[in-house]
Amino acid sequence: MATLRGSYPHPVLDDTDDVSTTFEVLNVSIVPTVEDVEVSFEVRMTDPDIGQLLLDGRAEYRFRWTCSATIDNDTLGQTRTTPLADSTRHQGWIDQHRVRGPVSVSVTIVATAELFDYRLAAQHGDYQGASFRLRPGDVTADAGYFEFEPDKMYDPLKPPLASCFDFRPDDQLRKGIRARFYDDDRVRVSFAPSLYTDFASLGDRPELQISLVVLPALMATISYIQSNQGDDGEDLRDRRWVKIVIGLIEQVGHLDDSPLDLAQGILSHQLDRALARLTEGDDD
């Protein structure tokens, strides 16, 4: 891990010898989801003086991400903090649409109030016991940054449903798409060849791929499962894709709910996002 060190007149807890206590990032985990990249990591910070500032609300953690591909940056959204035995675990999310290439996340602690007599018991002896005046936003601790590649869960040719759909072109089709349910492992969704090419070309707009193709295919799949419930229906118990879809249905509703409502819930209401982005494009 590299350290992003500023030039400060006051002692900063980092990987130099300004302060003898510890500030480090551990156990980084990156989990891509349909809408976001979930970023979680542990922070170990052992300085009691800075710890008290955090407890008093006079300092706070600051996590900021930067994407080198999109030149976008922001603070890590909706961060959750979980205390652990000797550290804290932090969890936040980055919108999938805002990142494509390498992403770096910097981890700092900054003052949130003016500190008139700032000094640390563990600061280096070269400071000779001096105290300092810090303003809001001044860095008190810098753990550097970690980097990751934001691998997308949503592959243009694989829906975000544990690969229970198989998308492929079909020379027998001239228009539209067709869902077939005879395979044990996956539902086969066939395209007219030209549509398949158009579908794949929307790789940078997954919300459109989901809304235009995955949503209706999932609705048809849910309807098929519903129509085969009961003694008169086809026995679907051994089909892997049925177990996957039923598990997803149970997370958002009940099997007898509307296929449209269930499909939208499973897909995190990507239709809303698609329409919003199309509207934003009209406003540009």
Image (cartoon, rainbow, N blue to C red):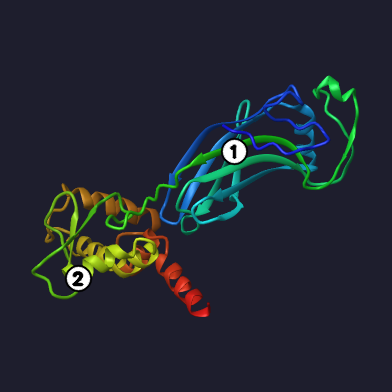
At x 86%, y 45%, the residue is 114
| Residue drawn at the location 86% of the way across and 30% of the way down | 119
Q: Position of residue 221 (x, y in %)?
A: 23, 62
Q: Residues within 10 Å of mark 1 (few under 14, many from 20)?
A: some
Residue 263 placement: quadrant: bottom left
Q: Amino acid at mark 2?
A: Ser
Q: Residue furthest top?
A: 125
Task: Describe the element under mark 2 as helix, strand or loop.
Answer: helix
Q: Secondary structure at mark 1?
A: strand
The reply to whether residue 214 is visible in this rendering is no
For the image, the number of numbered tags is 2
Q: Position of residue 63 (x, y in %)?
A: 63, 45
Foreground: 159 or 106? Answer: 106
- Work out whether residue 191 or residue 149 is closer to the camera in this orientation and state it: 149
Q: Nearer the viewer, residue 34 or 70?
A: 70
Which mark, by number, is residue 194?
2
The residue at the point 34 percent across, 53 percent down is: 248
Question: Is the residue 33 above or below the residue 227 in the image?
Answer: above
Residue at the image position 62 percent from the left and 47 percent from the top: 64
